[in-house]
Image: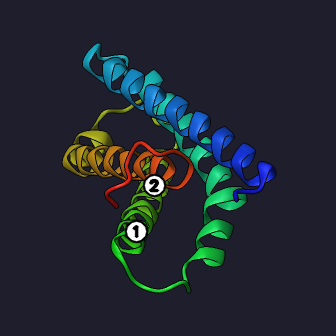
Amino acid sequence: MICLATLFIAEMNLILHIIILVVLFVSLELKFMKRLFLHGATMLIALVLHVISFILVMWPSFRLSYPYGYNTFSFITVTHAILGGTTLILAIWLIASWRFQRSLKSCSKRKNKMLLVFVMWVIALLLGILLYLYLYTTLVPWL
């Protein structure tokens, strides 16, 4: 039986990460529209929301659940955690190196890194959603 508080926290975290996913794609659209300062600002918003979620929910959850053996679920959890943690560190580095600069020179040098972090972030978010579905619904019983 799942504790209602745990379920509530998981649901709020899922909603937050769906919002983050939407913000990421809005930010990508802003980049294509050449609204690069807004692109950077929306990526910063997504990063701050993600850091808050990481500190309050994901890290404590991972630390509490990790020692329970190895199976497909734990493989996906560890993959999600490693990919998500790496993405978080790289995103912090990218945003910190940008520092709200209006010049595009520093950004153009990091274009490939930004794309890689974006793709990693989306994959980590999708893995997190898959874990939520496995843990709190009956939609993915095959894990």
Q: Is residue 27 above or below residue 101?
A: above
Image spot of residue 54 (x, y percent):
61, 57
State the residue lying farthest toward the top.
33
* Tag 1 and tag 2, C-beta contact below 8 Å: yes
Q: How many marks?
A: 2
Q: Quadrant of residue 31?
A: top left
Rendering colour mode: rainbow
Give the residue pinned by disc 2.
131
Report the amino acid beneath label 1: Phe
- Disc 1 crowd rating (10 Å Cα; few below 14, some 14-19, many 20+) is some
Residue at 41 percent of width and 73 percent of height? 78
User: Which quadrant holds the N terminus?
Assistant: bottom right
User: Which quadrant holds the C terminus?
Assistant: bottom left
Image spot of residue 27 (x, y percent):
40, 26
Please state which of residues 96 and 46 is positioned toward the viewer in this rendering.
Answer: 46
Give the residue pinned by disc 1.
73
Label 1 and label 2: CA atoms lie apart by: 8 Å
Image spot of residue 53 (x, y percent):
64, 51
State the residue lying farthest toward the left.
112
Please state which of residues 111 and 78 is positioned toward the viewer in this rendering.
Answer: 78
Q: Secondary structure at mark 1?
A: helix
**Residue 76 placement, left or right of 41:** left
Q: Is residue 27 above or below residue 92?
A: above
Image spot of residue 34 (x, y percent):
29, 17
Question: Mark 1 or mark 2, which has the lower sequence index?
Answer: 1
Report the amino acid beneath label 2: Leu
Residue at 54 percent of width and 29 percent of height? 19
**Residue 52 placement, left or right of 90:** right
Q: Secondary structure at mark 2?
A: helix
